[in-house]
Image: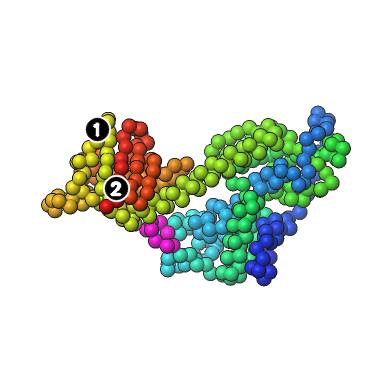
Amino acid sequence: MLTLKSQIMKNLKFLTVLLIMSVFTFTSCQDEIDNENGTNPNANSANSVTASNLQRSAMYDGSFDDFLDGISCSSILLPVIATINNTQVTILSESDYTLVLDIIGEFTNDDDSIQFQFPLNVMLSNYTELQVINQSEFNALFEACEQAENEAEDTITCLDINFPITILTYNASAEQTGSVVLESEQQLFNYMTNFNEDELFAVNYPITATLNSETVVEITSDADLQIQITECLATEDTEDEAEESADNLEAILVEGLFVVDAFVTAGVDTANGYAEFTIDFANDLSVRAENTVNSTIADVEGTYEVASELEVFLTLSFSGNATFELLNSTWEVTSYSENSIALQSTTNAAATLVLAQI
């Protein structure tokens, strides 16, 4: 195991040490020279944009446990013991992640606290294992990851290359010297990290890749690879912005008290049917409508959920009152502020709802 050195915490420009450390030596036998490809005048050096794209796409993706450690450049190796909102949890396997999610998801507007028992082990983006012995070293790891993200040196998680792929090698005269078949992200990362600066390489296109974990595309050139990465990173940024907006909206809902300011269906505004009610969103994802004029009318109970993809959505589900059940839908949030939330039905674009804070 490696240990974090003290100078790491004094100088966060150690990105190369933390995230591009010495990696496992990758050895592969080159195939026979591919006479069909011959020479390639567009071969890349070890310092090329394509080399960086391949290396970053092949880095270990530690973002799957960000809800636990908040560090996308690494993941915590299990088992680990953590105290979450004053509740101690032993996480033996990934199936125990639900224990963590249940605790932090219990309330929507609280400040969740996660404290680990040290030492613990993490897997870095260069596939090396690191022992973290205290909170200061953990904080340094977090700051290093932030720096990597700010300098676009972190893992590209929105594009997953589908393996195997073939890399062709060339000499300085752009004459092919061999080829190698790579079977995994770790092999690709190690290969690009240790690629000889005196050599050139080219990807044997076409290859395929999966974008944002759902769409498979064919990539036919280095330029095409760059385009796909640029576009999926832009989509990822939009998703991150939507997630942040969802968090902001959730806080506004919980902290405020609302009335139906407008509810338009088929061109008719029926907000008057809700004029006597205030709507209160609780931090346990329950919602209650209370009649403030006639106390003999029972409160209307329901649930809500705020979610995000490329946009932000608010789902309402009332029961026991036909008027409020008309609001039951998944609504796209078209705009919001502390004073007003404008919504449009995802199933009927002509149906709109505006909630105003009082």
- Name the foreground residue: 239 vs 275: 275
Q: Is residue 86 visible?
A: yes
* Figure colour scheme: rainbow
Residue at image position (27%, 33%) is: 265
Q: Upstream in the sequence, badge 2 or badge 1? A: 1
Residue type at the position of mark 2: Ala
Residue 343, image x, y percentages: 35, 41
SS state under label 1:
strand
- Name the foreground residue: 39 vs 191: 39
Residue at image position (58%, 65%) is: 139
Residue at image position (81%, 41%) is: 200
The disc at residue 213 is none
Alpha carbon distance from label 2 to label 1 = 18 Å
Residue at image position (84%, 46%) is: 198
Q: Residues within 10 Å of mark 2 (few under 14, many from 20)?
A: many
On the image, numbered disc 1 is attached to which residue? 268
Examine the structure image and report whether residue 8 is included in the region drawn in magenta: no
Examine the structure image and report whether residue 107 is included in the region drawn in magenta: yes
Q: Which residues are magenta?
A: 104-112
In the image, residue 153 above or below residue 265: below
Quadrant of the image occupied by residue 11? bottom right
For this view, does 3 lie left or right of residue 281? right
Do the residues under discs 2 and 1 have CB atoms within 8 angstroms?
no
Residue 151, image x, y percentages: 64, 52
Residue type at the position of mark 1: Val
Residue 329, image x, y percentages: 32, 40
Q: Give the overall secondary structure of the magenta segment.
A: loop
Quadrant of the image occupied by residue 350? top left
In the image, residue 18 above or below residue 47: below
On the image, numbered disc 2 is attached to which residue? 356
